[in-house]
Amino acid sequence: MSLLTVGSVAFDALETPFGKTDKIIGGAATYITLAASYFTKQNNLVAVVGGDFPQEMISLLEEHGVNTEGLEIVKEGKTFFWSGRYHEDMNTRDTLETQLNVMADFNPVIPVSYQGTEYLMLGNTVPATQKLVIERMAKRPKLIMLDTMNLWMNIAMDDLKEVLKLVDLLTINDEEARQLSGEYSLRKAAAKIMEMGPKTLIIKKGEHGALLFQGERIFFAPALPLEEVFDPTGAGDTFAGGLIGYLASTDDISFDNMKRAIIYGSAMASFCVEKFGTERLVNLSQEEIKSRVQEFVNLSSFEIQ
Amino acid sequence: MSLLTVGSVAFDALETPFGKTDKIIGGAATYITLAASYFTKQNNLVAVVGGDFPQEMISLLEEHGVNTEGLEIVKEGKTFFWSGRYHEDMNTRDTLETQLNVMADFNPVIPVSYQGTEYLMLGNTVPATQKLVIERMAKRPKLIMLDTMNLWMNIAMDDLKEVLKLVDLLTINDEEARQLSGEYSLRKAAAKIMEMGPKTLIIKKGEHGALLFQGERIFFAPALPLEEVFDPTGAGDTFAGGLIGYLASTDDISFDNMKRAIIYGSAMASFCVEKFGTERLVNLSQEEIKSRVQEFVNLSSFEIQ
């Protein structure tokens, strides 16, 4: 089935204990569509970039089967830019600079050819913009998944709560789940958040894995313990992209299939952090993905006698 | 098979956001032997208490099948006492008071009837004392498991490294694994620590579960997401007690059985934190344990198609 991803396509400049990059391609929708490209061939993108965005980066997305008809290019504008520096532990980072540029006026237009897309992925961006996208879909998608962050809880909580009423699946990290719900216990937090709209909730815990909640059901997916985390940028978006790409490709939104989808998302995220930016994501083989998923099986399987 | 646990039997006074206790029974060996009592009936204890330690607490251990022949009572001495206050997040705590008392001169004597015990559990205490216990075993046990903490890495690292050479299985938490190895990546840390002696390593991550390492093999056991953590005191010791109790009862130290043992240990720890101190641990039924283990199966099982 087809997937539509709406979110940022951007430049990032990164510093980690392992080195630093100049401006490289980044943005939530970039990571999401690249990760999803290994699962679904109907991979539609809506985003905005400036005239400074190089054609070869657009071509890179297209080579991975991403439909860029909905990628608006504002010739006189500049592309969204973010730079950050990771701390030694790789779990925390400082934002050095954010230039919203063309994202400040992002008015997502859904091409006619995208209408009827069954799976909608709303990458992390302004909640009001996410809501606009849902309103602009002629037919409600089968599954609407939303990613967000603490920034919007701080400055646009009302808008966020409005859009949450409209989505099926929410992904946030553990600190954000606590902030959104006011509950420290993730189990209590999940119960409260599911009352806000999304029937299914995924709480991401980074190197500690992810929890899937739906009604009374809970599933825990571990993260793969890696020798080295080289650059965590985009890991959450890659996780989301692998997850929704797998759901779209299998067109099965049962709880059991969501469990599988989280494992695939986690496997994709484990690749992402092995290199800077999208480097590792653009050259994966299906065999590598299969073998990585098997590592997750080995990591977490046991039998009670 | 039989189990010998050596460690502290103590008084604790606890403050959590949910309330506070007067002096209640605590200590590593108390939690370990109580947890193990649900698995093995040959449950030998070596510890020391003062004349202030109430007979009804000793009777409580005995009612759970703990053999207290090796529990030394120093009539003129006082029992080891620890008091602490947990922070709001329950993951960090301040020590308010530590009185070593009779533990300061703990000279573990192994009763003749304990000799030949196949499974030896060295609860967290002075590394030189742990080494003394191993030397005092007439025959090397089939499995020696050791628990320790950052304190000994700070003040007795050389002694700790000496005893590590003699043990099969080490349990420490993630921060301690990083301190002991000098590596941030837990996978690299594990490789270094296994070169220090223990062929098998368990890294405890509290609410984030536990990792089992043996050679190139890794297994991850999740922690159960709980509605509420009431009091985390003794959770690590209860985990260790359930684990070694299960290994001793099944007398199988294969990797597959260690995976099961970690799940049983995690299940026991999940009960422990539901009430103050040992309260929840002294009244469990086999049905409750079976049902809790099934929750772990449900939490972590998935099938890749």
Image (cartoon, coloured by chain):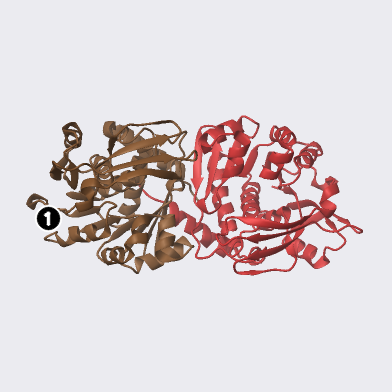
Chain colours: A brown, B red
**Residue drawn at (83%, 57%), measured in percent from left and top?**
B49
Check the image and name the residue furthest to the front: A76
The residue sitting at the left extreme is: A112
Q: Residue furthest right?
A: B76
| Residue B134 percent across, percent down from the top left | 77, 38
Q: Is residue B265 above or below residue B186?
A: below
Q: Is residue B240 visible?
A: yes
Q: Would you identify the image quadrant in which residue A253 lies?
A: bottom left
As drawn, is B279 to the left or to the right of A223? right
Q: How many marks?
A: 1
User: Quick check: A255 above or below A195?
Assistant: above
Judge the density around disc 1: few (<14), some (14-19), many (≥20) Cα neighbours within 10 Å: some
Q: What residue did someone put label 1 on?
A: A116
Q: In the visual, does B201 lie left or right of A95? A: right
Residue B201 x/y as whole percent: 59, 39
Disc 1 element: loop
Q: Is residue B252 visible?
A: no
Q: Position of residue B273 (x, y in %)?
A: 59, 61
Residue nearest the observer in this picture, B297 or B94? B94
Chain hosting mark 1: A
Q: Position of residue A127 (x, y in %)?
A: 27, 59
Q: Quadrant of residue A92?
A: top left
- The answer to which of A203 and B282 lies nearer the viewer is A203
Q: Label 1 sits on what residue type?
A: Gly
Residue visible at 53% across and 37% down? B184
Say left or right for A298 vs B75: left
Q: Is residue A280 left or right of residue A78?
A: right
In the depicted structure, whether residue A76 falls above or below residue A130: above
